[in-house]
Image (cartoon, rainbow, N blue to C red):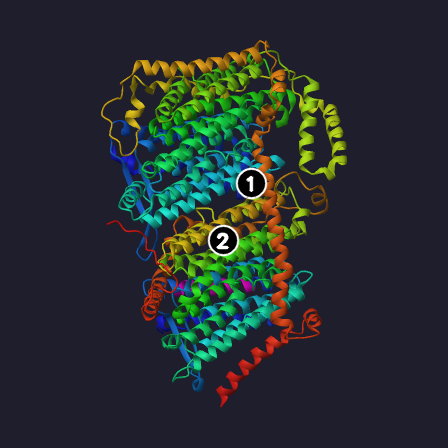
Amino acid sequence: MNTVDFPWLTTTILFPVVAALLIPFIPDKDGKTVRWYALIVGLIDFAILVYAFTNFYDFSAPGLQLVESYSWVPSLDLKWSVGADGLSMPLILLTGFITTLAILASWPVTLKPKLFYFLMLAMYGGQIGVFAVQDMLLFFLMWELELIPVYLLLSIWGGKKRLYAATKFILYTAGGSLFILVAALAMAFYGDTVTFDMRSLMDKDYPVNLQLLLYGAFLIAYAVKLPIFPLHTWLPDAHGEATAPVHMLLAGILLKMGGYALIRMNVEMLPDAHVYFAPALVILGIVNIIYAALTSFAQRNLKRKIAYSSISHMGFVLIGIASFTDLGLSGAVLQMVSHGLIGASLFFLVGATYDRTHTLILDEMGGVGKKMPKIFAMFTACSLASLALPGMSGFVAELMVFVGFATSDAYGLVFKTIVVLLAAVGVILTPIYLLSMLREIFYGPENKELVEHEVLIDAEPREVFIIACLLIPIIGIGFYPKLLTQIYDVKTLAITEKLENSLTTLAEQEMRSKPLAQEPLQAPVIN
Amino acid sequence: MESIYEYAWLIPVLPLAGAMILGLGLVSYNKAMNALRKPSAVFIVSLLGAAMVLSFAILWSQVQGHPPYTRLIDWAAAGDFHLTMGYTVDRLTAMMLVIVTTVAFFVMVYTDGYMAHDPGYVRFYAYLSLFSSSMLGLVVSPNLVQVYVFWELVGMCSYLLIGFWYDRKPAADACQKAFVTNRVGDFGLLLGMLGLFWATGSFDFDVMGLRLEDLVETGALSGAVAAFLAVLVFMGPVAKSAQVPLHVWLPDAMEGPTPISALIHAATMVAAGVFLIARMYPVFENIPVAMDTIAWTGAVTAFVGASIAITQNDIKKGLAYSTMSQLGYMVMAMGIGAYSAGMFHLMTHAYFKAMLFLGSGSVIHGMEAVVGHDPALAQDMRLMGGLRKYMPITALTFLIGTLAISGIPPFAGFWSKDEIIGAAYEASPFLWAIGWLTAGITAFYMFRMYFSTFEGGFRGNDEGIKRQLKVAKLQQMGLSMGPGAMNPQELAIESEVHDDHDGHGDHHHSDSPHESPITMTLPLMALAIPSILIGLLGTPFANYFEAFIHPPGEVIEGIPSEVDWSEFLAMAGSSIGISLIGITLASLMYLTGKINPAKIAKQIEPLYKLSLNKWYFDEVYEVLFVQGSRRLARQVLEVDVRIVDGLVNLAGFVTLVTGEGLKYLENGRVQFYALIVFGAVLGLVLVSGVT
């Protein structure tokens, strides 16, 4: 058998799902066998992903690779088609990595372990599916499919208000995804051919007005997922109630679906509309950064605090996407991967802390650093990563977005200055809320009540291992960002080129300067 | 000779490796690692020693006239954008490498004695090594981005080290304050950096300077914008080098262990701001507005710092304000174009201030034997006095440092400070006047500190003063908790004071302080040598220093040695004169007691209060920024929870399930709507697949 033609992606999607279906038949009384089973399945799947990408994926080619396409519904031109390019490949790897670690993080789950791991494995396949599928209808199905495990994971294993949170989550996301369906149908039936294939849809020539409508529809759906203000309010609720492993998936992967789809559909398929919408994205990005940082600062609930910080970090993704530069877009992708790692690690540590203190309210904590020095050290390291300390991945991503946006030719000088200035305010706000969080949990004299009533044991090796696994790539990318950027560089370049074409064509069509910049100010040139 | 440049990257990497090995050991084998105290210390110190030897070799090679050496690698790239990182070694770097490694080396040796009884001994060495590595990385940086990277990293190390005793509340507050205040400066630095890159397309210091000059000259960029960008960049040094108005973190940073105060908050990290101004000199020198801003910021800082130092009773706080004031001198020197003088003062100050801080640590170490491990008591000069009898080495080295900082020839500080004041006279009489006056205040407060610590009779056993200090401290804490907590707080004061009386036996080892162990006094003596002699490198008669370190664009042939004797005598005479006045006043007030300082304080009470309360910077910032941001954040959260969440819920879904929406939400039946949509699509697909 020729290994190049082996359906690698389909295998990695279906393998965890099939393995999940076998879970009911595993003889297991206390839930100890099934968690090893799930972990091994996760590891194998991740190994297949790594093997396939290292051997059969060419980092220097911008197009889709590892493509498989099987006809499913010929009359609708619906195909089971998957593939990976520079945009989806890093996120697929991230999915495998985080989900496997999340399974390892689920060790303390004792309630209905079979169902829990069944759902985790189902999620595994579904998430890879979202990033890999190359068919609009299939994408929509995957998008919806992955909601159900999350809903159940939230509503069965969550905190006190879990039902409210889970329902809110599914209403928001499912409500948003209706827009995907409508837009996908509109795109599919526009023109002479009916097709759901993403590449064919990309080649269709939509009039600008239709593009704007489609763009708006997609934007609503993805704004819920990313999330973007004002559609973010499901996130603190969902995160506030979720258990640590679910948390890791929510922050590490699910949010990235929004960013991924935004680049894949809005930017790549509707570049003309993107030219019009980009300033709005930038402004929303700014609002995300500042608004969420402030709400995070005021939050007294640890999980919600970190949840808001996720929203704040996603603002940089938006600005990067809308920067019209290689650097900015590259930074946006890097920020997604980086936040996937950092967000997952922070949420895991919040979970680990909660397992010991049994409270999430900051006022009831304090001074536990003495009792749990390892957790303290890891929490500090991850918080520093989150506040974009150089030497860690978050810094590189934010710096790339900053430099990319500052050197963008698409915006006027005044607009650029204001945006960079406001985004940089986030640089001040982030340490304020993260460091005061650390201070309130770990620093100061011990909280007598807490120390007397709870058993505060330090981190066990399993927990140290999980954080080490997450910190190694965070620091690795921080030290040498090309490790990651070079594997998707060609793709972001190709997208930016396409965008620049749209920008110039539109500018020429309208017989005036670029639509965004009333007074396009290039960087001054030495004569 | 070339090979030492090829291996120059080892200088920052060696301490980094040490820190990582210790750090990994602490996380994975905590108990075993903590037991390996001496081996860890020896390991870290020898790694840094190796880096120090390498630095001296490089300095020697630079003195011999080796051209600058740069090595770069492609670090980040996207499209045609390439960002390089690496290291560059030129004269400035070579000098900084030697300063940082020598001070760090002696501080590390000293640490062994100072932290001997601390359970965090190994962790402290790991942090120290990490800091040294970051600081060395900063000085070898070839471009602004790399400076920014290490700039933040030294800030992080400073955060970790200030909060080293994390169970102390003041330390917890101080480390956060330091980091956030520095981030405010970094905010400006980041923006300035982005702006300069936008304008010049480069992060390289010389290229930025050249292109910016061209751009302004050809009118492609308005001078105002260039000045704005330069001032933004300068915000970084303002925070890092504790310049007004972002100086507030430095005095609080004294909550960290004393070796840290010597290394980070006196000799090296806070000087990084001055170093950055030197690196950015090609950009700044062509922008008069920026240079003036720098000069005046420095001058104001020098004065404000000195004026606060006069009334401080905490020996470390006093030294911290003195550091701030001296940094002001350096910044002012850079601003008036006295590049060489500013760097010279950086060097001399690094040695004598490190020694002074280590000396204060030695004093605290000795005092703790008498008053116990309470910083409020062990660091308060009102409890000291007469320590010269008990700790002769510490007293002698402290006196040398005091003479050096007061500008008495031939000690190091005289030559460097005098060069700055002389240059200020040429730039502006106002700046000169501030510098000159500050020199007098400096001599006064430093001798006040020396006299009240080492001369007179020992007051450490005076229970009255102790009780008074304790009450003051608790009252301060009580006040910061708000008026509502007053009553229980008063009880706490009583009980704590009472507790202390009961617990005498636990705290007191003896009734008299003792001299510190050899690992602590040896670094003091070693640092005393440069504090006395190093100034002779830069005398106006033969300024070897200026021949070696001068602005990037300037060419200096031979050793500058033209002395205008009348001018030199006038300048030196006037500054020695005001120093002597300061010393005389201090001795009258604190040595012989001829003048009662309390009486003077009464007479000029508003001024005294202003100085004692640090010009009320903290109080104003507390109201404006701390409480302001908290209030704003709370309001935003309120808006988020009540309005945004409510509106979106309302608009999106309550319409979907009118009337009984809430009921549905609670019993979780609405998700069926989502499932129905999903099912319908799936059905559609399947049905059309079958047909």
Q: Residue at x 44, y 87 (%)?
A: A75
Q: Which residues are magenta?
A: A37-52
Residue A238, position in %: x, y?
Answer: 61, 62
Residue B316, position in %: x, y?
Answer: 55, 26
Compared with B116, A343 (above or below) is: below
Front in this rendered view, residue B520 or A219: A219
Disc number at residue A470? 2
Compared with A38, B49 (above or below) is: above
Disc 1 designates what residue? B176
Q: Is residue A411 left or right of residue B607?
A: left
Residue A258, position in %: x, y?
Answer: 49, 65
Q: Chain of mark 2?
A: A
Element assignment for label 2: helix
* Mark 1–mark 2 distance (CA, rounded to whole Å): 25 Å
Q: Chain of mark 1?
A: B
Q: Residue at x 43, y 80 (%)?
A: A188
Element assignment for label 1: helix
Q: What amino acid is labelled 1 in the image?
A: Gln
Label 2 crowd (10 A; few <14 / some 14-19 / many >=20): many
